[in-house]
Image (tube, helix red, strand yellow):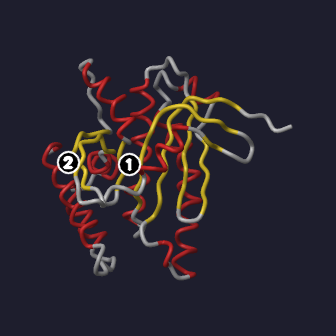
Amino acid sequence: MTEIKENYGIVVLMDALGVQNATIPESMHFINFLKDEAKGVSLFLSGYTESSELREHFEKIKPIVKTFGDTFLITWSIPSESNIKLYLEAISFTVAVIICNGIDKGILVRGALSIGEYLESDTTIIGPVITDAASWHEQANWFGCITTPNCTQHVNSIALEGETFDSLIEYRVPLKSKKQIKLWCVDWPFIMKGVKEVDPLKWYYKSISKLPIPPGVENKYINTEVFLKYCSSRTT
């Protein structure tokens, strides 16, 4: 009988813009990207946690990455009484690297990060936190990664204690509904500047200029550019 585990942890659900209409060569490019990033999650976190108090937990329980269609899911079971900030920072750094690698390779990803309870078996991952991330991962009208409104309350609670985040930034996120909502977002421009050691705007324009921008999706690019400039203005 398949064992069903009750977990508490961080969940990230992301998809790639435009992949559903991709050609076979473009689809192959995306599949290879997913394979590389799936391996990269544990590799990056291994380096990130090497001198961190998270190291012991990471050695015992590593994130799980599942892919399906144009979507990939990252789950990381963590102790429910843990210092959530440390785990959120670690995953957000990792997601930022994925976003930047995607831009480098012409694959623009969008998603949501949440934290809570879920059930896991050999074949299925299901539960409130999965539903939460799934409900929000396509709502932002840009590419990047947001915290869900529920996860945002966790981050707000931590921020009220005077804690600051390197990998998350509070921002009024433009939604596909044309509304805006204040959430925390993965600060990939800041991470990119540190990891790649290049000017964020120059790097971004050089990468994006290689991609077509068909009518109807231009706002995603415009909104992303505004976010990038906002983050860059705060880190220079």
Circle 1 crowding by C-alpha within 10 Å: few under 14, some 14–19, many from 20: many
CB within 8 Å, label 1 to label 2: no
| Quarter assignment of residue 204 | bottom left
Q: Amino acid at mark 2?
A: Cys
Viewer-nearest residue: 217 or 229: 217
Q: Earlier in the sequence, mark 1 or mark 2?
A: 1
Q: CA distance from mark 1 to mark 2?
A: 13 Å
**Residue 212 position in % (x across, y down):** 32, 80
Going by the numbered disc 1, the residue's amino acid type is Ala
What residue would you read off at disc 1? 96
Residue at disc 2, secondary structure: helix
Residue at (50% x, 78% y) in the render: 22
Query: Total label count?
Result: 2
Quadrant housing the C terminus: top left
Image coords of residue 64 (percent x, y)? 61, 43
- Local crowd size for mark 2, using a 10 Å CA cut-off: few (<14), some (14–19), many (≥20): some
Residue 162, position in %: x, y?
A: 23, 20
Residue at x 58%, y 67% (from the top left corner): 31
Depth order, front residue of 51/40: 40
Quadrant of the drawing holding the N terminus: top right
SS for dot 1: helix
The residue pinned by badge 2 equals: 231
Q: Label for residue 79?
A: none
> Residue at 33% across / 30% down in the picture?
153
Left or right side of 153 for 71 = right
- Reply above or below: 165 against 83: below
The image quarter containing residue 4 is top right
The residue positioned 15% from the left and 43% from the top of the image is 234
